[in-house]
Image (cartoon, rainbow, N blue to C red):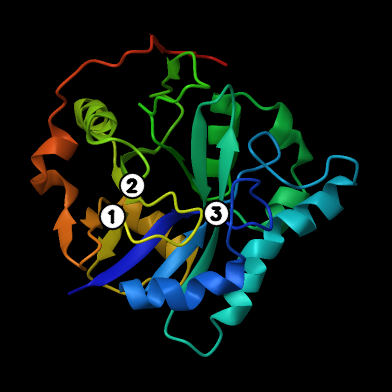
Amino acid sequence: MGYLYETHLHTCEASKCGRVHGEDYIDFMMKKGYSGMIVTDHFFNGNTCVPEDLTWKKRVEIYCSGYERAKKAAEGKDFSVMFGIEFNFWKDEYLLYGIDKKWVIEHECMMEMTRHELHEAINKAGGIMIQAHPYRERDYLSDIKLAPTAVDGVEIYNAANTPNMNALGYEYAKDLGLPVTAGSDIHYFYDGDMGGMLFDEKLESVHDYVSAIRNGKGIPVRLTCDGVITPVKDIREQTMPTAHPTLPVLYPEGR
């Protein structure tokens, strides 16, 4: 069976698009069969609901509250809640794992960093930086930005994307030889397909997750509404692109 973890999840405490309080996810995710989840709310340069007219520390306190509420609600249950960040540049977004609230409070400068500078800082702290939904297309996007030299891996299955968008990401990651991840990008309760990472061993902390990804462990999977777990690599429509991107693809190296 293994242990299934959600790696991409938003709460209404920090994400403007979130519809669920952190604590309310626990029973929902457990019933779906997950062993844990990583809260990755939109940071201050993304679709955040954290007010701008506060001190940095106060903003970080509010930002982390969804994660902290979820973690507290999971106490005494066989379910792990871990901390992450979804960080935005020019509408290309990255999942940051392995840093904590203290690190964020001490690094207000992260808002001024380039992709490569942030990647270096996250690595120095012992974490990893994963490009989220790299080939995502939306009506508010004018292009696709890829940063292959500023990431430690690629999210190749995102339940909020179309199969072809995911397949393009899968092909991209495989061509580069980068580690791959999967997640639901969940913002509210729903009964559609979800995603996650399946491991042979239980993860006790986000550092276990970081170590596993660095060492090529874990299987990106799709979880269907009827509970069937399938490795993404075995789903043809999620791995074999049927069309080219309709948006131009840019490589903003060095920025």
Q: CA distance from mark 2 to mark 1?
A: 6 Å
The quarter in which the C terminus is drawn is top right
Q: Residue at x 84, y 52 (%)?
A: 57
The amino acid type of the residue labelled 3 equals: His
Outermost residue on the bottom side: it is 76
| Foreground pick, 139 / 142 | 139
Q: In this picture, is 76 found above or below 146?
A: below
Q: x and y percent of residue 189 in the render?
A: 46, 62
Q: In this picture, is 114 found above or below 232?
A: above
Q: CA distance from mark 3 to mark 1?
A: 16 Å
* Element class at badge 3: loop
The amino acid type of the residue labelled 1 equals: Asp
Report the mark closest to the observer, 3 or 1. Answer: 1
User: Sequence order check: which comes first, mark 3 or mark 1?
Assistant: 3
* Element class at badge 1: loop
Q: In this picture, is 193 found above or below 2?
A: above
Q: x and y percent of residue 122 in the render?
A: 56, 42
Label 1 near label 2: C-beta < 8 Å? yes
106 relative to 127 in the view: left or right: right
The amino acid type of the residue labelled 2 equals: Ala
Label 2 Cα neighbours within 10 Å, binned few <14 / some 14-19 / many ≥20: many
User: Sequence order check: which comes first, mark 2 or mark 3?
Assistant: 3
* Element class at badge 2: loop
Using the image, tell me which numbered label, if any, was put on residue 159: 2
User: Sequence order check: which comes first, mark 2 or mark 1?
Assistant: 2
Using the image, tell me which numbered label, if any, was put on residue 178: none
Q: x and y percent of residue 17 in the render?
A: 60, 46
Q: Residue at x 15, y 57 (%)?
A: 230
Residue 203, quarter of the rendered image: bottom left
Q: x and y percent of residue 72 in the render?
A: 62, 79
Residue linked to disc 1 = 193
Residue linked to disc 3 = 10
